[in-house]
């Protein structure tokens, strides 16, 4: 980290997910790394935790330069495991990773000091908090050493989430000359409260955070988060809905809102997104044939693919509402004897014991049928060529040989299966207790022949090595027609944002950061393929009816109308580009510098 002007600020971003894919903040840090490096060059460095497994694929070790080198060496002399290098993502930002294991012997002393100095007590039986205390002390120690060696040079430290934020109140208590920014991507207590299915947003002004966090045995974690929010020179959140939540739970109104963006280069395909939709839809057709054909068939030309995905949070992610709305949609389409079939996917990781034999068998039988038909097609082509080359028209009755008829009949018979197509692709551990499966069965969404809505629960994330789809997740999304994310608790919402930049219409709720953002910036969002469900000002039953109506209206669109909608959806991509949304980060850093040093960045 060297530069022509030694007075220019240094920027450090501190996160649990730096070069470690353990949560959604990984996507935030990774996707904006390229833009941040463009702006800050080698004055930018991320700080995280060293994990050998993650480092093997995400981290390139290097020796630090003259700016950070002396400080890193000083820490190493004190027994701290410090790894310096580059994160192997676009932009190749510099990273500093601490090996927490080298400092476990100091944990008790640091926890005692945290109590004595800041009044934050931490139990011994919370390994995650123990790691957070060690990491926070190492970050504070590093910044103190750096500031001592570079007096007068402005330093910005941007902390993400409570797990990485213990160092922030330590910096303020020790009066270190560091401008601090804290971003809560989702308040800890808010996530817990919403998971318990209380009427969170209506009760929020009257909740007692100390009591609520104590009842859930997270009071010590809550204290860390609140200390970071109040200690930061600049406090930020990712959306207006989270700002409202933080104001009541953390007792500080955020100074700046930092919406989460995307690096559009990762999704831009030179306006080929319509062709890619058709290509990947054909692969989903292949899965559908393998999963359903043999039990019964339906017209794939009149089939729409809906999906929801994310962490398995049944209520917070709105899976309960998705299933209820699918039930109502199914009833409506059946009453109308609709020619439309909806295949609704649920892509959420759960505990499984590999793929169902039936799911694999159907996939392999369809592939065998396809290979047989391709072989026969080549033979028919040869016969047509040989006949016409000799000046004759081929005899239609002799185009398919007797043994080929036998092969086709065998393939057709092998496809025949009894019973109903499974609603899940894997052998579930705890099948009878699974919330998703139980709710699907309760609503009789069990893939009956006359159901117009079919369901497929795929309890792991989709990757290119998946034998059922042979698609990456992004390719699967492009092949679908509609993403449905009716979340109750969603501080931002990357899944609908990713749909938007890929030209895939989506449903989100007005309790999600993304939904609020689009409502503020887009006139008539639905005409642009952004359906915003009201979950804040109406009751659950009315929200379910709204969602069912939204999906029904989408089913009524013609193919041409869906193409036009995808075009309008994709045009919204610029709104989500980090080159635009990154300006909010600049505002937050400038405000922190101004409050600390009386200066701003250039």
Image (cartoon, rainbow, N blue to C red):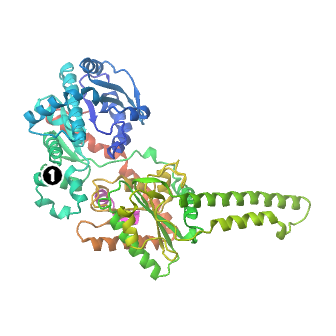
Does the segment drawn in magenta span residue 94? Answer: no
Q: Confirm whether residue 323 shows in the render.
A: yes
Q: Is residue 597 left or right of residue 578?
A: left
Residue 113 x, y percent position in the rendering: 11, 31
Q: Is residue 39 left or right of residue 410?
A: left
The residue carrying mark 1 is 213
Query: Residue 253 location, x and y as percent?
Result: 15, 50
Position above or below: 223 against 105: below
Is the C terminus in the top left, top right, bottom left or bottom right quadrant?
Answer: top left
Note whether 486 is above or below 234 in the view shown: below
Q: Secondary structure at mark 1?
A: helix
- The image quadrant that residue 136 belongs to is top left
Above or below, 169 against 147 in this view is below
Is 525 magenta? The answer is yes
Which quarter of the figure has residue 514? bottom left
* 596 on left or right of 3: left
Residue 510 horizontal/vertical position (percent): 28, 62
Can the viewer see residue 550? no
Q: Decide which of 11, 323 is in the foreground and name it.
A: 323
Circle count: 1
Q: Main secondary structure of the magenta part?
A: helix
Range drawn in magenta: 515-530
Question: In what quadrant of the picture does the N terminus appear?
Answer: top left
- Residue plotted at (84% across, 58% down): 385
Can you give x and y, in whole percent of width and height, for residue 358 in the image?
54, 61
User: Which residue: 22% across, 54% down?
Assistant: 192
């Amino acid at each position: 980290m060297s530069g022509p002007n030694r007075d220019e600020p240094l920027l450090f971003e501190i996160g649990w997910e730096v070069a470690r894919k353990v949560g959604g903040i990984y996507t935030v840090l990774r996707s904006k790394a390229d833009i941040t490096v463009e702006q800050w060059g080698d004055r930018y460095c991320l700080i995280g935790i060293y994990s050998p497994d993650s480092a093997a694929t995400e981290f390139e070790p290097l020796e630090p330069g003259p700016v950070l080198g002396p400080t890193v060496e000083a820490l190493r002399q004190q027994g701290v495991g410090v790894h310096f290098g580059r994160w192997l993502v676009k932009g190749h930002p510099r990273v500093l990773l601490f090996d927490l294991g080298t400092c476990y012997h100091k944990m008790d002393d640091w926890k005692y000091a945290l109590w004595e100095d800041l009044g934050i007590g931490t139990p011994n039986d919370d390994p995650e908090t123990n790691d957070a205390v060690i990491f926070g002390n190492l970050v504070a120690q590093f910044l103190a050493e750096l500031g001592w060696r570079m007096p007068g040079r402005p330093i910005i430290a941007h902390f993400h989430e409570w797990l990485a934020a213990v160092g922030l109140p330590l910096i303020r208590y020790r009066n270190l000359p560091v401008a601090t920014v804290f971003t809560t991507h989702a308040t800890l207590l808010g996530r817990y409260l919403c998971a318990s299915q209380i009427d969170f947003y209506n009760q929020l002004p009257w909740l007692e955070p100390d009591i609520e966090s104590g009842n859930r045995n997270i009071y010590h974690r809550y204290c860390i988060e609140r200390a970071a929010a109040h200690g930061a020179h600049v406090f930020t959140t990712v959306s207006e809905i989270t700002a409202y939540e933080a104001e009541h739970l953390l007792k500080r109104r955020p100074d700046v809102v930092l919406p989460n963006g995307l690096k559009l280069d990762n999704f831009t395909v030179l306006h080929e997104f319509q062709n890619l939709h058709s290509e990947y839809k054909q692969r989903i057709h292949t899965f559908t044939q393998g999963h359903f054909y043999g039990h019964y068939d339906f017209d794939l030309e009149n089939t729409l693919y809906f999906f929801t995905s994310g962490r398995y949070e049944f209520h917070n992610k709105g899976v309960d509402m998705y299933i209820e709305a699918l039930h109502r949609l199914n009833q409506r389409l059946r009453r109308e004897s609709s020619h439309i079939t909806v295949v609704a996917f649920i892509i959420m990781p759960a505990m499984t014991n590999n793929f169902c034999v039936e799911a694999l068998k159907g996939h392999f039988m369809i592939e065998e049928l396809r290979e047989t038909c391709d072989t026969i097609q080549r033979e028919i082509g040869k016969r047509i060529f040989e006949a016409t080359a000799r000046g004759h028209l081929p005899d239609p009755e002799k185009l398919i040989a007797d043994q080929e008829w036998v092969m086709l009949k065998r393939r057709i018979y092998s496809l025949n299966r009894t019973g109903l197509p499974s609603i899940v692709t894997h052998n579930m551990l705890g099948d009878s207790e699974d919330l998703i499966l139980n709710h699907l069965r309760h609503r009789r969404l069990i893939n009956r022949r006359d159901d117009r809505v079919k369901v497929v629960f795929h309890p792991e994330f989709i990757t290119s090595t998946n034998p059922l789809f042979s698609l990456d997740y992004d390719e699967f999304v492009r092949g679908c027609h509609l993403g449905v994310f009716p979340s109750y608790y969603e501080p931002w919402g990357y899944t609908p944002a990713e749909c938007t930049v890929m030209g895939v219409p989506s449903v989100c709720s007005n309790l999600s950061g993304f939904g609020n953002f689009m409502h503020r910036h887009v006139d008539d969002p639905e005409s642009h393929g952004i359906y915003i469900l009201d979950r804040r000002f109406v009751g659950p039953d009315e929200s379910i009816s709204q969602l069912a109506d939204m999906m029904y209206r989408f089913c009524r669109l013609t193919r041409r109308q869906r193409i036009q909608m995808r075009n309008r959806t994709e045009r919204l991509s610029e709104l989500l580009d980090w080159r635009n949304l990154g300006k909010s980060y600049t505002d937050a850093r400038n405000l922190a510098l101004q409050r600390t040093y009386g200066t701003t960045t250039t």
